[in-house]
Amino acid sequence: ETGVTQTPRHLVMGMTNKKSLKCEQHLGHNAMYWYKQSAKKPLELMFVYNFKEQTENNSVPSRFSPECPNSSHLFLHLHTLQPEDSALYLCASSQVWDPAYEQYFGPGTRLTVT
Amino acid sequence: DQQVKQNSPSLSVQEGRISILNCDYTNSMFDYFLWYKKYPAEGPTFLISISSIKDKNEDGRFTVFLNKSAKHLSLHIVPSQPGDSAVYFCAARGGGTASKLTFGTGTRLQVTL
């Protein structure tokens, strides 16, 4: 497997469920990111991890909880979500924690909250 | 308040002609600009970038122009090919948060035969 992979690709969950999104990068990068893309809105940065340490939390509600156990893996734990959280969640990685460096994106997880 | 705007949600161009995708920004602190391309069911992929100290950057068929006084950048694709059909996102770095990219909403380019 090469590049950035994300599982699952699609997820439907109720508001009381707990689920997790997984991201894995096979590029040897040091920085990893979670983005949210809602319909007709720009990509919004949620979290940044650099060398496994969280460096950015872009005012994300606590019902989203990230975890980065090592530089290759990133999780987004979800609990008690709201219907407005339905969106495409994209994971990305880059060699260096600097937006000027190319970010490699996974295909995303399409989340629907019912 | 959107700091990076792509006012054309879609654009249709004939194969072989020039495609021009536009992007406007409001924050004069942005110092680096990037274009990403996204195909359906795939993540965005990096296309080309430009520093604010330059006004043009070229890579094969793709050229990005930056007009700082107008706070405007554009992506030119010449000649356009059917495989260029995708959504193109403009993004900017800086604006007080050096570690963050601010994205536009994207322009869907359709290259027709």
Image (cartoon, coloured by chain):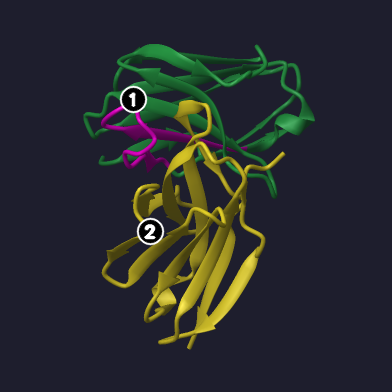
Chain colours: A green, B yellow
Q: Is residue B11 left or right of residue A47?
A: right
Q: Which residues are magenta?
A: A88-106
Asked whether the beta carbons under mark 2 and mark 1 sit within 8 Å of each other, the answer is: no
Figure disc tally: 2
Q: Is residue B76 above or below residue A112?
A: below
**Gap between marks 2 and 1, in whole Å?**
29 Å
Image location of residue B9, percent across then percent down = 66, 63
Q: Which residue is mark 2?
A: B55
Callout 2: chain = B
Q: Is residue A105 among the parts visible in the rendering?
A: yes
Image location of residue A53, percent across then percent down = 37, 11
Q: Amino acid at mark 2?
A: Asp
Q: Is residue A114 among the parts visible in the rendering?
A: no
Where disc 1 sits, the SS reads: strand
Q: Nearer the viewer, residue A97 or B93?
A: B93
Callout 1: chain = A
Q: Is residue A33 left or right of residue A11?
A: left
Image location of residue A51, percent across then percent down = 30, 15
Q: Nearer the viewer, residue B69 or A32?
A: B69
Q: Nearer the viewer, mark 2 or mark 1?
A: 2
Q: Is residue B6 above or below residue A95?
A: below
Residue at 65% x, 38% y is A87
Crowd tier of the residue under label 2, counting other residues whose Cα lies within 10 Å: few below 14, some 14–19, many 20 or above: few
Q: Which residue is mark 1?
A: A31
Asked if residue B11 lies in the magenta stretch, the reply is no
Residue at 25% x, 33% y is A26
Please tell me the numbered disc located at residue A79.
none
Residue at 52% x, 27% y is B96
Q: Is residue B107 left or right of residue B51?
A: right
Dot 2 and dot 1 within a common chain: no
Q: Nearer the viewer, residue A45 or A86?
A: A45
Quarter holding the C terminus of chain A? top right
